[in-house]
Amino acid sequence: MVPLLEKASPDARVITVSSGGMYSTPLTKDLQFSESNFNGTEQYARNKRVQVALTENWGETYKNKGIGFYAMHPGWAETPGAFREAKDK
Ligand SMILES: NC(=O)c1ccc[n+]([C@@H]2O[C@H](COP(=O)([O-])OP(=O)(O)OC[C@H]3O[C@@H](n4cnc5c(N)ncnc54)[C@H](OP(=O)(O)O)[C@@H]3O)[C@@H](O)[C@H]2O)c1
C-alpha cells in the first residue's frame, strides 16, 4: 500500500488498532506459541504487542515518505468481537 499512501502524502496515515491487553505480556518472537500449550487470550495479547512493534518498524522503514504510522488502544467497548471473546471464556 505504500505507493498509494505516498500519493496521499503528507496527510497519509496508517492507524493500527491495538489493545491495552498487550500490557499483560512481553514482546516475543515466538509467533507460533511453540513453547507451551496454546492460550487464545495470551495469543491475542502477544499479537496486540507485536502490532505496536510492527507499526514502529513501519514508521522507521518508511520515514521521510510523508506517511504517519500510529498505534492506539480504543478503550473498552461492547462490540460483537468483545462479546464473542467473553462468551468463549
Ligand atoms: N472492543 C473492545 O473493547 C476492544 C478493546 C481493545 C482493542 N480492541 C480492538 O479493536 C479492533 C476492533 O475490535 P472490535 O471489538 O470492534 O471487534 P469486532 O466487533 O469483531 O469488529 C471487527 C471488525 O473487523 C472486521 N474484520 C475482521 N476480519 C477482517 C478481515 N480479514 N478483513 C477486513 N475486515 C475484517 C470485521 O468485519 P465484519 O463485520 O465484516 O466481519 C469487523 O468490522 C480489534 O483490533 C480489537 O483487537 C477492541
Image (cartoon, grey):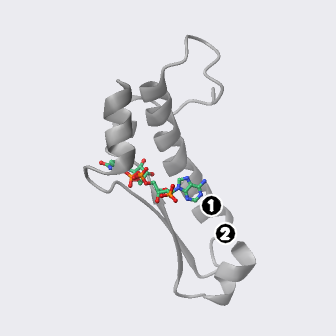
Viewer-side residue, 77 vs 68: 77
Which image quarter is the N terminus in? bottom right
Task: Determine which residue is flagged by label 1.
Answer: 58
Mark 1 neighbour class, 10 Å CA radius: few under 14, some 14 to 19, many 20 or more: some
Q: Is residue 88 left or right of residue 31?
A: left
Tell me, yes or no, if residue 24 can be seen here.
Answer: no
Task: Determine which residue is flagged by label 2.
Answer: 62
Q: Is residue 30 left or right of residue 14?
A: right
Q: Residue at x 45, y 30 (%)?
A: 26
Tell me, yes or no, if residue 12 can be seen here.
Answer: yes
Q: Is residue 80 above or below residue 41?
A: below
Q: Is residue 11 left or right of residue 4?
A: left
Q: Residue at x 39, y 46 (%)?
A: 81
Q: Residue at x 66, y 25 (%)?
A: 32
Q: Could you say where residue 70 lies in the image, as x and y percent from the top left?
A: 46, 64
Q: What's the distance in space between the residues labelled 1 and 2, CA to CA?
A: 6 Å
Residue furthest to the right in view is 3
